[in-house]
Structure formats: structure tokens, C-alpha cells
Image (cartoon, rainbow, N blue to C red):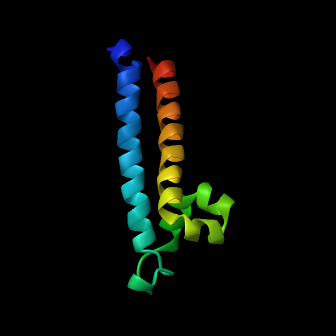
Amino acid sequence: MTKILQSKPFLAVLAAIFFIGHFAFQFFAWAQHPGNSAVAGQGSALSWFVSSFPLFAVLGSSLTTQFFWAALVANSVIWSVGLTWITAFSLRKVL
């Protein structure tokens, strides 16, 4: 069982799950953000600020406005790689 949890195919599937989950959550957080004119006055800014970190905070508003979808995907890749690394590291320590 421990070899399966530490195998590269398992970690690749885990990274894909983290990517899809983060991308969906980030998109939903953006759609519900109070600054979005489509749903002005609804939602919470906190979920967007957390899910959009670090890429949207580093690149600034002009670049992320021009390349919004690319930044959204790249940010989800950063999160999925980080979460997969943390999970793999934790599994190595526990198992």
C-alpha cells in the first residue's frame, strides 16, 4: 500500500485532482467576488484573495487582466504542485 501511495502515477492523479479542484474553486471565488460586475454586492472577497494568491498578487492587475485565463491556469498549477508536494512529504513521514 505504501508503494502505491508514493508512486509517480498516484502523485500525478493526485496533482490532477488538486488542479481541477483549485481551478473550480478559484473560478467560483472570482465569479462571486464583490468587484465582479456580474454579481456586484454578493459573495466574499476572502475566498478570491486566498485562491488567487500568489500569482495574482505578484503579477499585478494589468497583467492579470490581459492574461486572465492564463494566470488562472498557471495559479492552479502552482497550487496543485505545492499541495501534491506537501501531501507526498506528509505521506512519507506517516508511512
Find residue 57 and report its horizontal and vertical position in percent: 65, 62
Image quadrant where residue 7 sits:
top left
Find residue 20 and report its horizontal and vertical position in percent: 36, 48
Horizontal relation, residue 28 to residue 84: left or right: left
Identify which residue, 39 or 63, lies in the foreground. Answer: 63
Q: Residue at x 47, y 34 (%)?
A: 84
Horizontal relation, residue 56 to residue 2: left or right: right
User: How many numbered marks have been drawn onto this rendered protein structure?
Assistant: 0
Q: Does residue 55 sit above or below 45 in this rendering? A: above
Quadrant assignment for the C terminus = top left
Q: Residue at x 42, y 77 (%)?
A: 43
Quadrant assignment for the N terminus = top left
Horizontal relation, residue 35 to residue 23: left or right: right
Q: Residue at x 54, y 64 (%)?
A: 67
Image quadrant where residue 64 sits:
bottom right
Identify which residue, 78 or 69, lies in the foreground. Answer: 69
Identify which residue, 94 or 61, lies in the foreground. Answer: 61
Find residue 93 and report its horizontal and vertical position in percent: 51, 20
Give the residue at the far front of this rendering.
66
